[in-house]
Image: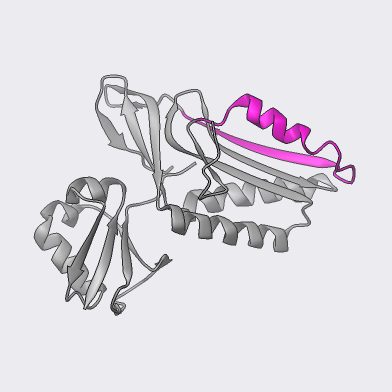
């Protein structure tokens, strides 16, 4: 199973990438563990997760080919 | 300043006073309108520590942002009696003193346009995935935090 990860703002800066694919991440909790293991700086950064452009709350399960976006706090306007 | 084809709301760079005045002028033939409300967000030269903000570079999750803008637009139309509504948000670099957000609501009577304008601005700030990178005069930067 594969998901497409998109990163924005400060998260993209920490990850050094705005878009990549990842295998075998089945849910939001797994994603956070994977991210914080690869990018320890993310432990101290607040971010929300959107799946296919919809914000999720809690440990939602992913489906194959989902687009999972990492969104730091919004600061538009 | 040109409109981003992919997105109706986003414009490259600052929103110019000329663009704003032309938007107002375009409504002169809609003679049932009795009130316009306009919100203009301007980039402020905040001081963060010893650094002064010279510009903000805006980026967005454009696909999701456009969906959010549509949702806010629909909600505002159903909540208030509006004749017209326009939202423009900058993407890319906007210097301090320039406009980065333009919300324009029109109605028959003033209450609807003023309340809708404020409602739309608050929802944009809270819900639309846009990020501002504050560029300092000295050359470094920090990620903008919402008030």
Residue A62 vs residue B66: left or right? left
Residue B108 vs residue B23: left or right? right
Residue that extends furthest to the top in the rendered view of this protein: B138
Segment tinted magenta in the rendering: B14-43
Q: Residue A22, position in %: x, y?
A: 18, 67
Above or below, A44 relative to A52: above
Q: Residue A45, position in %: x, y?
A: 23, 52
Residue A47 vs residue B56: left or right? left
Please tell me in which quadrant of the rendered image residue B17 appears.
Answer: top right
Q: Residue A41, position in %: x, y?
A: 14, 51
Residue at left 16%, top 62%? Answer: A35
Q: Residue A68, position in %: x, y?
A: 31, 66
Above or below, A17 relative to B99: below
Q: Quadrant of the N terminus of chain A?
A: bottom left
**Is B22 colored magenta in this rendering?**
yes
Residue at left 58%, top 27%? Answer: B16
Residue at left 51%, top 55%? Answer: B66
Please tell me in which quadrant of the rendered image residue B55 appears.
Answer: top left
């Amino acid at each position: 199973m594969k998901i497409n990860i998109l990163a924005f703002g400060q998260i993209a800066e920490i990850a050094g990438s705005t878009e990549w694919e990842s295998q075998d991440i089945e849910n939001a909790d797994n994603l956070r563990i994977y991210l914080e293991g690869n990018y320890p700086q993310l432990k101290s950064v607040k971010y929300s997760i959107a799946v296919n452009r919809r914000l999720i709350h809690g440990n939602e399960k992913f489906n194959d080919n989902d687009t999972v976006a990492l969104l730091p706090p919004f600061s538009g306007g | 300043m040109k409109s981003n084809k992919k997105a109706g709301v986003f414009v490259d760079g600052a929103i110019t006073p000329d663009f704003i005045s032309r938007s107002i002028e375009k409504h002169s033939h809609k003679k049932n309108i009795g009130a316009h409300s306009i919100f203009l967000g301007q980039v402020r030269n905040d001081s963060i520590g010893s650094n002064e903000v010279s510009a903000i570079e805006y980026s967005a999750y454009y696909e999701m942002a456009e969906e959010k803008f549509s949702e806010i637009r629909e909600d505002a139309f159903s909540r208030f009696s509006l004749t017209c509504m326009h939202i423009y948000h900058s993407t890319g670099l906007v210097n301090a003193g320039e406009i980065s957000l333009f919300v324009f609501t029109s109605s028959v009577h003033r209450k609807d346009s003023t309340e809708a304008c404020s409602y739309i601005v608050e929802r944009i700030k809270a819900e639309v995935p846009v990020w501002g990178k504050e560029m300092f005069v000295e050359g470094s930067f920090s990620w903008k935090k919402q008030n």
